[in-house]
Structure formats: structure tokens, C-alpha cells
Image: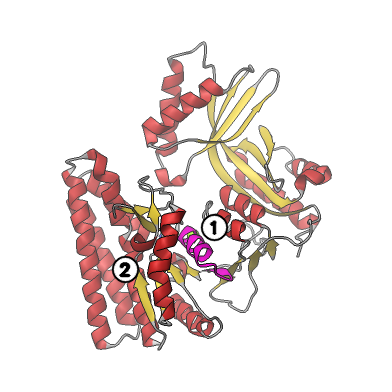
Amino acid sequence: MKFGGASLGTPMALEQVLSIVVAESTNWDNLVLVVSALDGVTDALLDAAQLARIANRRGYRRIAANLRTRHLALIEELAVGRSERKTLQADVDQLLSEMLDHCLLISNNLDAEILPSHSDAVVAIGERLSVRIIATLLRQKDVRGAPVDGTEIIITDDVHGNAHPDLDQTARRVNDVILPILEREIIPVVTGFIGATAQGITTTLGRGGTDYTASIVSALLGADELWIWSDVDGMMSTDPREASSARTIPHLDYDEAADLAYFGARILHARMVAPLAEMQLPLRIKNIYRPDKTGTLVAGMRRKAKPGLKAVTSIHGLALRRRASGSLAGVTRLVGNTLFKTLGMRSEVMIASQSSNSSFLCLVIPTSIGIDGVDRLQNALQAKMAEYPEKMPWEIETVALATAIGSNLAGAPALLAEVLQGLGDVEVQAVALGASNCSVTIAIPLADSRKAVARIHDVIVKSGSDNA
Ligand code: ASP
Ligand code: MG
């Protein structure tokens, strides 16, 4: 079972989590918990690492002090015995002093090469704090729990900030570390989101990475099921903060869930679905405040599903357009290089389309680059293209990608037509059908993003085919 930051933010939410774990611990032979940092803590730690980069020592120290106050207040508020409390307080101080050491190394800035690894070590503190608190709280409820650091089990490459696990090495570690704990009938409480290179240097798996940890650990342990607990009733047909008509999707297959995550539904980490799909391991998404509700089940479909629409999401991106056709290789390379130089990341081209007289290319930039990232990239691209005005007559603009997810869409041209028609006066810049046949993505002007999503959602509600 995975518990995300939103279910760990307040004493009330934590009580809820504990009562769920106490109840479920009797329902299963073995239970493993994978948990995130408390709500908002990862953001604060990222800010601290950023402040360290500009040598703002006062700034990152203030963040450490705030984190200390927050975690200690939580421990105070929850019924923890005196000696347990002392131990926890010492753990908090120890971890935050490690954080300050790494911040200091960053701000001394002696070797730019090693900055990302210290930054990951700073960010990892959030999860390392939360597992200790949760394991202690479980013991207070007479459930035996032991904290486990992801650095001991998730072995990754050295792409800091977005590391990829090596499944063979990780499988060995999971067997060596987790199985003995389970054999002693103790619940391992594993940090999500963090891992380490084979040399033991801390890495992180990308924002929202606790899902990914949970998915890898459950696949490698051959779990019966993975449950993701959050504070909504499962995966929703659209962002519930945007539309009151949003409703829970009862059933998704793996491809649909993967496309939903990939195209912007923030409830799941985009890479977490693949390990589950490979093992045909069912995933449930449930609400800690309404544990009796079934939530969403992601599993293999027994029969080929009827065509139907289930959900709509949106993400923001940059689009390049030109009034001519021709090879896209040159421009993709230019975009890739500029992106890498400006932001240190590889580009992900989401849509490329071409007709006899125009070309269109759309890429999506993760929000983790920060708010000014898109501007910086847009400026860098414009400058680069201006160097080759003849070869690169591209216009650059911001766009949104609205994605409708559903079953067997290629077999349902009428549904696709309804989606396009539903858009009304919203300009359609490009359309792409997903390879797995369960999504259609439409590039539209950024300013029309909300309107387009709301209109597509109306079509979904009207078509009423949620494949319940
Ligand atoms: N705490 C990490 C984050 O905020 C990982 C997670 O929440 O899944 O991105
Ligand atoms: Mg998440």
C-alpha cells in the first residue's frame, strides 16, 4: 500500500492512515507500506537545494528550521510514548543536520559535477523523515513496523532527479532486505521516491516517484495487489478541482491508466504502470477518507472492451509550426540540443504532424523545471533558430494538449468525431491517436485549454459510456 503526501499532511489524515493500516494488517498475509514525504515537504527541500546553489545559507537554514518545527509539532500532536518521542526527535535532528551538510557542500560549489547528487540527498530527507514517524506510530498501535530507506533497495542509474532503476539489482536487494522483515511478521515502511546508485549515492525517481517505488516493489515481491491511497475517490474523469461533474472511473486497463498518467493526470507517476502491466498485477486507487468505496481498479480486461470515452486530461507544451513540409529531423535535433543545454533535460516530442504545406511539432516540458523554464526554453529556441533563418522558419508558441482516454478508440470514429465537434470554436492544431488505441490527443491554443477540457468532459458525460 502506498500513501502519498496528501494523506500524511495533517494529524487527522495520519490517524486515518493508521486506522487503515491496522485494519488491513489483519486482512493480508503480508503488507508492505511505501510512503511519501509529508505534504509540501519535497517542494520545501527543492527550494532549499535551489537556495544552496545561490549560496543563500540563511534561506536554506530557515527551511530546515521550518521543517524541524513542522515534524516535531506533528510528533507532539500524536500520541507517542516518551522514549519513542525522544528517539524520533533525535532522528529528525540527525536527518536535518545531514540535509544542512549537503546544502553547505552545494553552496560551496566546488565541483559542479556533484551538485545534482547533493541536491538529491537533500530532497530525499523528506521521505526518510516520514517513514520513521509512521513506523513509530504503528508500533504505538501495536502493529510492528520497521522503516526502510529506498537507498538500500532501489538501485538506479546516476541520472539524478529522474533516475531509472536497474531491476535485476533491485530485485536482489528487495529479496535481501524486505523478505526477512516480512518473515519476522513486521511491516516494512519503505521510503518512496528515492534510490541509490550501485555505489550508494542517493538518487530520486522524479516527482511523484513514490508511486513508482510502490509499483517496482510490489512487482518484484509478486504482490497480489497494489493499493494507492490518496484523498480522492480514485482516478477521475477530469480534474475534480476544475469540474464538479468529475466522477470516479471504476475500471481502466493498463494502457488507459498509463496514457492517463503520461498525458497529465497527476495522481499516478507516468512510469509506474509498466511493471504492473507486465505482471498483470491489479492496482487499486482509493480514498483514505472513504476506505469502503471501491475507487478505481486498474487491471487487464477479460474481454475486448466496447469503444467508450472515460477521461480527459491536459498538459502544457511548446509548439513549433512552419508553412512548409520537409524533414523534421533537423529541427528535432535542434530542439533536443537546446533543451538539454538550457534545462539539462531530454525533450519528449509528443506530436509531430505534417501535411503537404505545413509542419507541426509539439513537445512537453515537465513542470519540475520551474515556472520560468518554459520562457527560458522559448527564448533559447528563438535565438538558436534566428541563426539559421532560411533553414528554420519556425514559429514557436505555447500550446495545450488535451487528451481524451477511452477503450478501443480506433474502432470508434464516431466518438472521435463527437470529441472534435464538441470542441466547437476551439482551434484544433493537430490530432494524434495514441499507439495503444486508447487515447486521442489534440493540440489547441494554451488560452483555450480549460474550455477545451470542459467541453470534452461534457462529451464524455453525455456519451455515458464509462465501462462500469
Ligand atoms: N515526495 C515526492 C514528491 O513530492 C514523491 C511523491 O510524492 O511521490 O514528488
Ligand atoms: Mg503522487
Residue under pointer 1: 268
Residue 192 in sight from this viewpoint: no
Q: Establish if 422 lies above or below 146.
A: above
At x 33% / y 59%, what residue is drawn? 124
Q: Residues within 10 Å of mark 1 (few under 14, many from 20)?
A: many
* Membership of 213 in magenta stretch: yes
Q: Is residue 17 left or right of residue 200?
A: right
In percent of width and height, residue 325 lies at 64, 18
Q: Earlier in the sequence, mark 2 or mark 1?
A: 2
Label drawn at residue 451: none
Residue 359 in sight from this viewpoint: yes
Please tell me in which quadrant of the rendered image residue 18 appears. bottom left
Mark 2 secondary-structure assignment: helix
Please tell me in which quadrant of the rendered image residue 386 appears. top left
* Membership of 8 in magenta stretch: no
Please tell me in which quadrant of the rendered image residue 321 appears. top right
Mark 1 secondary-structure assignment: loop
Residue type for callout 1: Leu
At x 53% / y 38%, what residue is drawn? 317
At x 55% / y 69%, what residue is drawn? 223
Residue under pointer 2: 129
Extent of the magenta region: 210-229
